[in-house]
Amino acid sequence: AARTSRTSRSNELSVCFTVLKLTKDTLPRLRAVLRYSLVLEADVPVSRVVFTASTPSRRVSASVNVTEGQICFQHRIAVQACVPDYYHPIDLSVDFDLIGKPIASAGNLTPSLSTETLTHRTETLEFETNCRSKDKCVSDLSVSLNKSGAQTLVLVPGATLHFVVRLQNRGEESVRTRVTIPIPLGLAFRKISESDRSKCSFPETPNLPREKDIISCNVSHPILPENTQMAFDVLLDVMWSAVWSEHLVIRVMAFSENEANETLTDNEANATLSILYPTNLVINREDFTPEVILKIGSTEMESIHHYYRVSNLAAVSLPVSVTFLIPLEVSPGLVWDIQPIRVGQKSADCSVPTTNLSVKNHLNQALSCPNKTCRIISCEIALLTNSEPVVFHLQGSLVPNSLSTVGGERLRLTSRAWVGFDRRMYAQTSPDPHQGLHHQITTRVEFVQVQDYVPILAGGAGGGLVLLIIIGLVLYKVGFFNRGLKTKMDQGGEGQDNGCQDSLQPEPTEAL
């Protein structure tokens, strides 16, 4: 059989037969008629090559006279331009028969074909390749799996899982390349992108997960050229009501008929996703003391109340931690004497860390808390359901130790609280993943100077009494209180009156 070339459109095929006489005799050379038939790729719908006789065909037949010895026949064959599969050889089916001619000198004795002769056989015609080794090409496939975003899967209704599979052939031409993606339980096939160089098969009933479902893609069959890359977009539906473990493993594998065992290590890729259950936690204000007024110089204490309400708006119940950052020293000389936190109907275990003086908030930011200025209190709720919110009551009195330096200043007393949960098992499903997880309550503190009128009144009364005593003493000194002075004053008053009367009477006139 002749070897054919991908770059040559026409090739010559030689078919040779050898006729041997099995009996030992002195008869003349045998003569016979050889009838043979040649068929190219009899078992495929469309042949890659044809005989270039008067009419191109995959079949050719001939009948020739032969004698003992070897005889060969030439037939020209044509290969399709850009033949898709030049790795697998061409099958050539050969059928023949030999009909002997009578020997006149031997009484018309007619030779016959031995019954042990195989009259049908299949030969192969190899393509010439551009492989480094002329025996065969060696591929080197690698496959990767990429999921955008976090490596998690949140079990919410209507969720989907999207990932991209990338295939690369870094070796020589790859034969019958195939990519397979097993579908884990809990996922159901929705769609996969297919290019004109790939053909994928997938479960016949999408959205109905079954055990051992698999996606299988034939890539550029039969030959994937060297230095070729391809990508597949895969979309699977998430059956959120299925039974899930802590992790989900997605696997993708690549296969080839001509890859060496030494390069198979990167023919499989895995992606491990953490399974997260949805939650929607909210902490907000239930009630609070909006404002208190303190009197400068007063030792009276004012009570302040902050109420926080923690709710679970999702269907999944989960353990929850609530952390409070409470100010102790509002300003120099003013302390909020906080009492133990009171919890509503549902119980929670609250404690004050003894060693850790810092805490991370809902944004994973570290906040420091010196012992003298603030206090951290952590409360654990064993199981928070969507039907039983928990209310935390922060209560304490403002204790003024020394308000002389405060003056008319206005202060703000702010407590902060945020909710935490195990992010390895749960995910906040609100549009903003941090929304609702933090809240703060502020009470305004105002200082007023109150005038004390008691000292003023007491001082005024005492001063008036002293003044009255002084006036009395002066009058006493001048003899205002003597009886003789009073008589003299009365007599002097009468003479003055007569004098006034005499001065006011008209003078007497003389008679003419």
Image (tube, grey):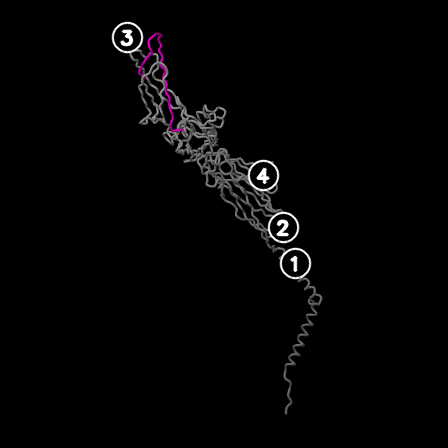
What kind of residue is marked 3? Answer: Gly
On the rendered image, what quadrant is the N terminus found in? top left
Q: Which residue is mark 3?
A: 107
What kind of residue is marked 4? Answer: Ser
Residue located farthest toward the top when viewing the structure as drawn: 25
The residues tagged by marks 3 and 4 sit, at their Cα atoms, a distance apart of 121 Å
Q: Earlier in the sequence, mark 3 or mark 1?
A: 3
Mark 3–mark 4 CB contact (< 8 Å):
no
Q: Quadrant of residue 97?
A: top left
Q: Which residue is mark 2?
A: 405
Mark 1–mark 4 CB contact (< 8 Å):
no
Disc 4 crowd, CA 10 A, few/some/many (<14, 14-19, 20+): some
Q: Which residue is mark 4?
A: 358
Q: Earlier in the sequence, mark 1 or mark 4?
A: 4
- Front residue of 139/303: it is 139
Q: Is residue 425 above or below residue 289?
A: above
Q: Earlier in the sequence, mark 2 or mark 1?
A: 2
- Front residue of 189/78: it is 78
Q: Quadrant of residue 453?
A: bottom right
Disc 2 crowd, CA 10 A, few/some/many (<14, 14-19, 20+): few
Q: Is residue 295 above or below residue 73?
A: below
Q: Which residue is mark 1?
A: 462
Q: Position of residue 135 (x, y in %)?
A: 45, 23
The residues tagged by marks 2 and 3 sit, at their Cα atoms, a distance apart of 148 Å
